[in-house]
Image (spheres, grey):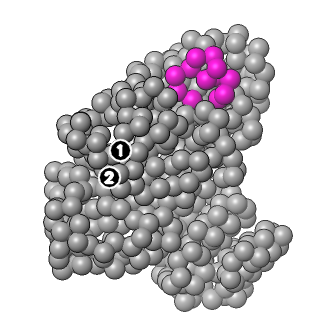
Amino acid sequence: MNILIAGDGEVGFHLARMLSEVEDHNIVVVDPHSDLLERLEASTDLLTITGDSCSVSVLEQANVRNMDLLISVLHEEEPNLLTCIIGKKLGAKRTIARVNTAEMNRDDRRAFFTGLGIDRYVCPERIASNEIVNLLQHSGTAEVFNFGQNLLRLMLLRVNDDAPLVGKTLARIAEEYPQLDFRAVAIHRNRRTIIPMGDDMLMAGDLVYVIARPEKGDEFFALTGKHDKKINNVMIAGAGRIGKQTTLRIEKEMKVKLIEKDRRRCEEVAAAVSRDTLIINGDATDLDVLRDEGMERMDAFIAVTDSTETNILACLYAKKAGVHTTIALVENIDYIDLAQTVGVDTIINKKLITASYIARFTLNAEVESSKVLSGVDAEVLEFVVKPDAKVTRRAIKHLHLPEGSIIGGVIRGSQSFIAVGDFHIQAGDRVVVFAEPYAVRKLPGLFN
């Protein structure tokens, strides 16, 4: 696939590096920052152009007329819209624009901009807010993602020191707890990701990705030493787009305190939220402010300020104060593993969120949904099986899956199934696959 990425910072940089790992993509990157492009050129073989993606001449230089996909992920919304509109007029087959405002997701707006040539939108802040709300509803897991109208669920579980599962192999766990009906698709241990087999043993401190039915969540939490606590009181540090959208989403069901040091932002959010939500003009790095506002009485603490370091440190303080669930916005990908290691429950990263949405449009297969995982270099994809696809010809145990991939579950109509060796996949099924980056490019051929 021929792909043109227009960016002005780390989101475009990360997306370009991720997609460059797929050998059959030809990628061109347009960015106004020559220093960033020099870094990209040093680590990849991509073609880069320094310039403004809203310029017709720059897009023509990038050969936009032959592009299968144009992705514009600049920080500002307007240049992304203009880049996609111009690019589509010049011949790009499909366009995706990063947007920042919630109104872009209204049906009437979507139809209007689609008519102008913008095929898809991605709003990282909105997706991040959705993930936070979902995590607050399932506080026993560090990461959660639903497939097929909530028929299957991917959960990231941290194994506590006193958990009943410590020291047991996956085969033994399945034998002792047959009612769980699960598939462990990855174990993250000591900064390594393991695609597990039945004889792999769980250890204290492991992060385990599990595919299971949603109703089994409470049992998994108990066996890993966690529990799913109902969240009633929430403190949010940071009143940017994510903080504001999250507050608006949860304030009817939960009591919210929002802390922001910028007075103007406080006033803007105060005008949008309900009177029951408390807006505090204060600094989240000031421990006295957090104590005075009753952090120790909170069920959840969410740090989504503009500073990764502030978010991590504030969450660690909240954890020390006894807060059950902590969620941090970590924009520096290099800090994700560190944040998880030191005890932050959940990490949100806008680069990974954006990549999750866009990646499925670059595969030569029908992908219903996908998610790039935090803390591990891997993805989970939901493939739709085409008639006479290779995966329909034999049982799962006889399929030659690419190394670094594993089938976790199958959705068939209104039913869900955990993937076991004797199961036969059928045309029309939606198959949930966990895969490391080098394996993703080999998967589409199995499902087409």
Find the magenta span and give its range. 315-326
Relative to 311, is 74 above or below?
Answer: below
Q: Secondary structure at mark 1?
A: loop
Residue 56: % across, % down = 69, 82
Q: Which residue is mark 2?
A: 198
Task: Point out which mark residue 199 bears.
Answer: none
Q: Say whether residue 48 is left or right of residue 35.
A: left
**Amino acid on which disc 1 is placed:** Thr
Q: Nearer the viewer, residue 129 or 145?
A: 145
- Marked residue nearer the N-terminal end (2 or 1): 1
Q: Secondary structure at mark 2?
A: loop
Residue at image position (48%, 30%) is 160
Q: Which residue is mark 1?
A: 169
Relative to 430, is 60 above or below?
Answer: below
Residue at image position (61%, 32%) is 343
Residue 427: % across, % down = 17, 71
Residue 23: % across, % down = 53, 82
Residue at image position (36%, 66%) is 367
